[in-house]
Image (cartoon, helix red, strand yellow):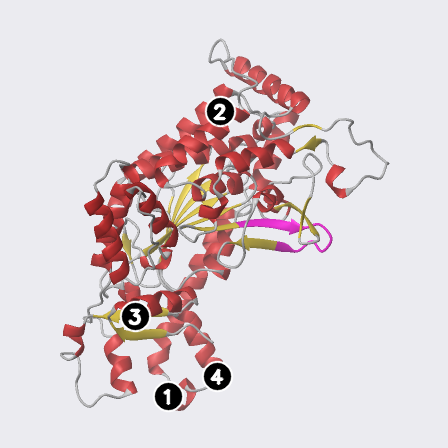
Amino acid sequence: MPSCLIGMKACVSTHHLSRKLNSLGHDARLTPAKYVRPYSKGPKNDFRDAEAVQRPTMKFVGKTRLRVFVSIANRLGRDRKADTDAAGAGLAVAHDLGVQAPSPPAKATPFAVAIKLHARLDVHAVPPISTAKHAAGGDMGGSGVEVSTLVLQGGGALGSYQAGAYDALLAAGQRIDWVAGISIGAINGAIICGNPPERRVEQLAKFWRQTSSAITTAPFNGQEMVLELFDETSAAITATFGAPGFFRPRMPPALPGFSYSPQRLSFYDTAPLRETLLSLVDFDLLNSGATRYSIGAVNVKTGNFRYFDTTRERIGPEHVMASGALPPGLPMVEIEGEYYWDGGVVSNTPLQYVLDYERPPRDMLVFQLDLFSARGELPRTLIEITQREKDIRYSSRTRMNTDLMCRLHKLSQSLARLGPQLPPELREDPEWRGLYEAAHENSTTIVHLIHRRALGEGASKDFEFSRFTMERNWGDGKLDVQRTLSHPDWLNRERAPRGVVTLDLTKEGKAD
């Protein structure tokens, strides 16, 4: 059925019911009992109920108690020595919210209880950290809560930029409700979603230090020519010997013109990646619903793009490997009898999936972490042509997609304004109702963070797994987030009803 606005009197059972309805795409709002009677303007009927739940001054509940629960759970998650009273308070608040808390064994630590509560907490009910102010017009969606999403582009060795960016987001206290990734973004996302918050940066660092452990030297000075030579030499070493914990040369190698099984049709073997994922990612936690996780891959036979999503299916290491199986270097991966390649073959950025196909009916805050910049300088050499072509191809028309979203939102605003002016008989027309329902979109803020070309970086940057470059990219990602979160345009941003705002606040970037 179409997405609906649903109003309910708040109680323990409706807390649970509202989360179920929200998970189905509806907008369920809870009203405190003390406010139900004052908002009655006459005998109870469907018309008056519908008017009341949409009234700008209507008060809704649930967030205060949820914030109490999140505060307690976060405290327990940070401090393994937290007292038992705090754990008991967390269990009591969870019960009041309709969250089915686990029954811990007698000797269970408060920390263990907190982790289980985190795993069972419905992400649709928990408010992320947000500093946005509302424009005139009231509280969009009734709750004022943004769904905070991390969109991670593919880009191989450049992915440590995303790890550094997440490091800074976590340090700033920014909650993430949903992670969507492609290729290396899927790997970073799995490590983020498959660990409790206090271990995520540590596990990301383990992954990136392992993949860069074969080349730990650094260039002897910072001149561009020296950096270019170092970049190409490091990439050549990676191409020859692979990246530890990620991929290794296939032995014996596959020869052109000869037939092999699908799993052997590649230059490299990704068995090390499977072991790495199993050691760094708790797949039970990843699939628990604590943080939504979505990754894209391409069906080799049909050419169709497919997203694997923890809201619909259980995701394992094979799904993550499929999202990063870039041919012909890495082998296709079998899932349920079908073979998949890297999602970047079709689209390297899952932004459209998040904003168009699967967005919940609430305001959204999207941190889009791109590893290839669509903008660049005019090439001067044949080598620079190769690099520029790769940047354009893998940037996946990011700015065009955001521009299209802005145009669609403007059309949505026009439809919403036109609705009340139509005669009643036209409002009941099924075709108009379909258009009008589609027009009721929430506000969207897209924070664009882009890895920009470093001095000496060449066309092989996405498979140059040196420790020096990894740490540089990590630091760049961290710095870009710190600059963004301290920028006046971020600190003073407002959420306009049905509006789209894009912020690119690093280096030459500015708010759009």
> Could you say whether the residue bearing mark 2 is in a helix, strand or loop?
helix
> Could you say whether the residue bearing mark 1 is in a helix, strand or loop?
loop
Residue type at the position of mark 3: Ser
Decide which of tag 3 and tag 2 comes sooner along the chain.
3
Any mark on residue 430, and which? 4
Indicate which label's residue lies in the foreground, 3 or 4. Answer: 3
Any mark on residue 13, and which? 3
Task: Tell me which segment is drawn in magenta.
Answer: 295-305
Any mark on residue 209, and which? 2
Report, in whole angstroms, how far the alpha carbon at label 3 lies from the one at label 1. 40 Å
Q: Residue at x 62, y 54 (%)?
A: 305
Decide which of tag 1 and tag 4 comes sooner along the chain.
1
> Could you say whether the residue bearing mark 4 is in a helix, strand or loop?
helix
Give the camera-side residue of 210 and 349: 210
Across and down, in percent, residue 243 comes to 60, 25
Decide which of tag 3 and tag 1 comes sooner along the chain.
3
Few, some or many residues within 10 Å of mark 4 (<14, 14–19, 20+): few
> Could you say whether the residue bearing mark 3 is in a helix, strand or loop?
helix
